[in-house]
Amino acid sequence: MHAINENMRTAGGRSGARSIAVWDPLVRLIHWGVALTILLNGAIVEEESNLHEWIGYTAVTLVAVRLVWGLIGPAPARFSAFPPSIAAAVRHIATIMRGEKHVHLSHNPVGALMVYNLWATVLVMGVTGYMMTTTAFFGVDWVENVHEIAFNWLMLSVVLHVGGVVYDTWRSGVPLLPAMIHGRKKVPDDIETI
Amino acid sequence: MKTIEWFRSEVSRRATIFAAIILVQALCGLFFVSDIVTDWESLTSREYGHLAIETLATVALAACMFASMVELRQLLTRMAAMDDSLRVSRGDMAVVIESFFERWKLTPSERDVALMVLKGFDNEAISELRGTAQGTVRAQCTKIYAKAGVDGRAQLLSIFMEELLDGGVRPDHLDRDVSPATAGAALSRAPAAP
């Protein structure tokens, strides 16, 4: 029995790991789209330009589509697969400390908090950015300050996000970056998925 | 296997195009909404008709986008179901093959050879892969056919083909006791569960 299973698995071109489809194309396009807008607006495009505004609104639109997709999308993309829960995040950190290994097919609870944080920050930047273009809020200090603080927070979050991805790839042995490119998580056979 | 892989990549290509179309719709929606906001800010009483039509068009676009997202979700769900049933049927097939081999009391090396025969390798390839003489493989094949009660390769294959097309092992087959010698004559009979 075992021999044949082994045989069939290697016949499929995979050995020692199974590959599971997790990130659908819409999730992936939005992810890299938002990353691109952050890169463009944060480092390349001139502030207070028309282009800066349009790129910002594009980021907000992408996040908005993602939020709708979180309600009606397939299971791993839905909010119910990664509910925001600080308790779950603490439990997840505890299991890491104990050295247990299991793989979350969607975001892990700590990653989930980062995801909600990134979306919220992009939305705050979008709203304050729009407010700066209106006559009612043009030149108002606190709006500009919030936009600035949110940007710094976003940069810090991006660094933590990338760091988390690198760390989790090293810890669990599941390459997360390729999963966000072709959509499939390659999970070693001896590791359980949740 | 190749056909299934092709089919899967074809479906996932279609899903990616679908996701891209949804995002294009979203960005067009962004343009329309910003146009409405601009019009609203500089509104004179005569432009109400124009604004109403513009709003209607935007709402229609949003509805289309929502419909596309529902459609994409269904496509992705079908894809996931296909993945699942593929995994299950691979497992089922392994069980079916193993139970026949068990029934026929094949030796370990005969099992290897029989599996390669099922996969379509000819005697020369099998002898090369196993590092044995072609005469040995021929003798092993003869024993396998004798134990299975079939005339040759094609009939051996047809036993498993029948099993697949039949929809797998059925309870009424499990009750019937078919001796290995008559299994070839009655091709659609399944062996008793091991």
Image: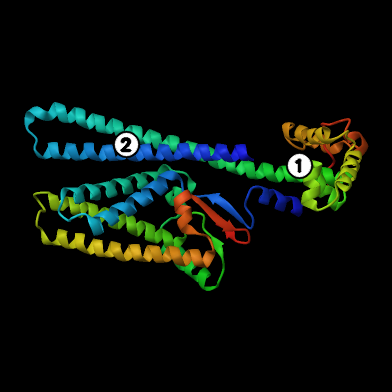
Please report, as a chain letter, where disc 2 is located: B
**Residue B100 occupies which quadrant of the picture?**
top right
* Amino acid type, residue under disc 1 in the picture: Phe
The location of residue B88, given as percent across then percent down, is 66, 44
Asked if the residue at tag 2 contacts the one at tag 1, i.e. Cβ–Cβ closer than 8 Å, the answer is no
The location of residue B50, given as percent across then percent down, is 15, 28
Label 1 belongs to which residue? Answer: B121
Q: Residue at x 85, y 46 (%)?
A: B134
In what element is the residue under mark 1? loop
**Residue B19 occupies which quadrant of the picture?**
top left
Q: Considering only vertical position in the picture, is A103 above or below B10?
A: below
* Amino acid type, residue under disc 2 in the picture: Gln
N-terminal of the two: label 1 or label 2? 2
| Residue at the outermost bottom position | A97
Q: Residue at x 88, y 48 (%)?
A: B136
**Residue B96 occupies which quadrant of the picture?**
top right
The location of residue B24, given as percent across then percent down, is 32, 38
Foreground residue, A97 or A161? A161
Q: Gap in Å between the C-alphas at discs 1 and 2?
A: 51 Å
- Disc marking residue A62: none
Label 2 belongs to which residue? Answer: B25
